[in-house]
């Protein structure tokens, strides 16, 4: 297989742990037909050292022969709620605004 060049869009400082990890792509079974699909399992103290603590949401950028995994910035609950409200119909958005106005 040809060596791939992979460049992340953002330059993040490397952690003091070894920057290269060797993993093997395995498989997982999907339900209900139990087909095998490619799977990648990562675990180790190095993940936390790199900023990936338990519960951290991640973004995975997929390119040919390259995966770039970045931790998402923590988003306050209020912002998550606002994003949900923005998907509501106009009538429901007005109801939410009226509810918030009544709380003042």
Image (spheres, helix red, strand yellow):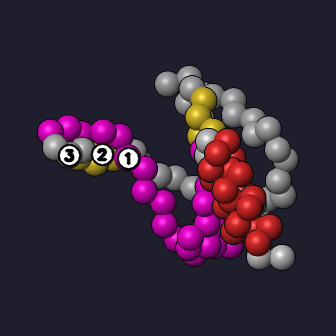
Q: Which residue, given by chain and number where applicable, does mark 1 sit on?
A: 39
Q: Quick check: 37 left or right of 10?
A: left
Q: Residues within 10 Å of mark 3 (few under 14, many from 20)?
A: few
Magenta stretch contains residue 85: no
* Among numbered discs 2 and 1, the one appearing first in the sequence: 2
Question: Residue at coordinates 75% horizontally, 40% vertically from top-left?
Answer: 8
Report how far apart the C-alphas of labels 2 and 1 lie in the structure: 5 Å
Q: Residues within 10 Å of mark 2 (few under 14, many from 20)?
A: few
Q: Which residues are magenta?
A: 33-60
Asked whether residue 26 appears in the rendered view, the answer is yes
Judge depth for marks 3 and 1 and give the one in front: 3
Question: Residue at coordinates 35% horizontally, 40% vertically from top-left?
Answer: 38
Q: Which residue, given by chain and number where applicable, does mark 3 sit on?
A: 31
| Residue contact between numbered discs 2 and 3, judged by CB atoms under 8 Å | no
Q: If the image is split into quadrants, where does the C terminus sit?
A: bottom right
Q: Which mark is residue 23?
A: none
Report how far apart the C-alphas of labels 3 and 1 lie in the structure: 14 Å
Numbered circles on residues, count: 3
In the image, residue 14 above or below residue 76: above
| Residue contact between numbered discs 2 and 1, judged by CB atoms under 8 Å | yes
From the top left corner, tell me how far across and down residue 84 is, in percent: 63, 53
From the top left corner, tell me how far across and down residue 81 is, in percent: 67, 61
């Amino acid at each position: 297989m040809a060596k791939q060049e992979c460049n992340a869009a953002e330059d993040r400082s490397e952690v003091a742990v070894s920057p290269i990890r060797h993993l093997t792509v395995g498989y997982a079974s999907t339900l209900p037909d139990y087909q095998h699909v490619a799977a990648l399992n990562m675990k180790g103290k190095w993940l936390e050292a790199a900023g990936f603590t338990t519960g951290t949401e991640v973004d995975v950028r997929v390119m040919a022969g390259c995966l770039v995994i970045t931790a998402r910035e923590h988003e306050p609950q209020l912002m998550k709620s606002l994003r949900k409200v923005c998907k509501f119909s106009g009538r429901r958005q007005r109801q939410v605004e009226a509810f918030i106005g009544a709380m003042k």
